[in-house]
Amino acid sequence: MAEDSNYEADVYAPGYIDQLDNNAELIRRAAEYEMGQTTYYDGLIEQAPEVMDDNRIRSERELLRQVRDYHQENCDLMGGMYENLTGNRLDLGRTGRFEAPTRYMRGIERGIYDGVGQVDRYQNIYDNFGYRDNYYRGQVTNAITNTLQAALLLNLIYNVGRARY
C-alpha cells in the first residue's frame, strides 16, 4: 500500500475489499484511456496548424503537447495507484491508434467532450475510496486537476480557432 504517513484505511469496514477491487478495475481502465489519449494527441499535434499569430504567446502545437503531457501524467498516476492496490504493474505500451477527425477543430471538440467524461470517471473513483483513503483521493484529485487544465488549454485552442476558421 501507500507509503504516506497520513494514510489510514479502515480495511475492516464492510465491503472495503470489494470496493478496492472495483476501484482497481476502474483505475486500470482510466490508465488505458489516458494512454490512448496520449496517442490521440500525438496525432492531433501533427494536424495542428503551424501558424502563430502575433497576439498568441504559444503555438497550438505547443499547447497540444502540454495537453498530451497531462494525459501521460494521469496515465502514470493511475498506473502507480493500480500497482499500489494490486501489486501488479500495468503494461500499457502505446495503446490505441490515431483516427484523424474530419477536421482539425472536430478533434479539439472531441478532446473537450472526452475530458468532461473523464472527470466524471475520476469522480467515481474518488467517491469509491471513502473519506479515509487520503493518499488515493489525493492522487485522483491530481488527475482531475490535470484533466481540467487540459480542458482549459483545449478551450483556448478552440476559441482561437473559431475566430480564425
Image (tube, rainbow, N blue to C red):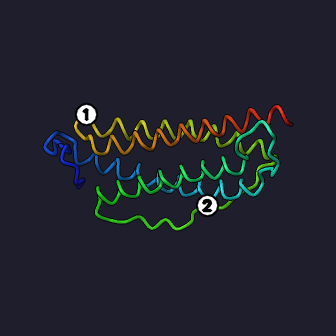
The structure residue drawn at horizontal position 85% and vertical position 36%, both measured from the top left corner, is 164
Residue extending farthest to the right is 165
Image quadrant where residue 47 sits? bottom right
Q: Nearer the viewer, residue 87 or 163?
A: 163
User: What is the x, y in percent for residue 25?
Assistant: 39, 52
* Local secondary structure at mark 2: loop
Which amino acid type is marked by label 2? Answer: Gly
- Measuring 74% from the left and 32% from the top, which residue is drawn there? 159
Q: Residue at x 52, y 41 (%)?
A: 147
Q: How far apart are marks 2 and 1 (CA)?
A: 34 Å
**What residue is pinned by disc 2?**
96
Mark 2 / mark 1, whichever is N-terminal: 2
Q: Where residue 1 appears, x then y in whole percent?
A: 23, 55
Question: In the picture shown, does residue 88 fall above or below 4?
Answer: below
Which residue is disc 1 drawn over? 131
Residue 85 drawn at (x, y percent): 29, 55
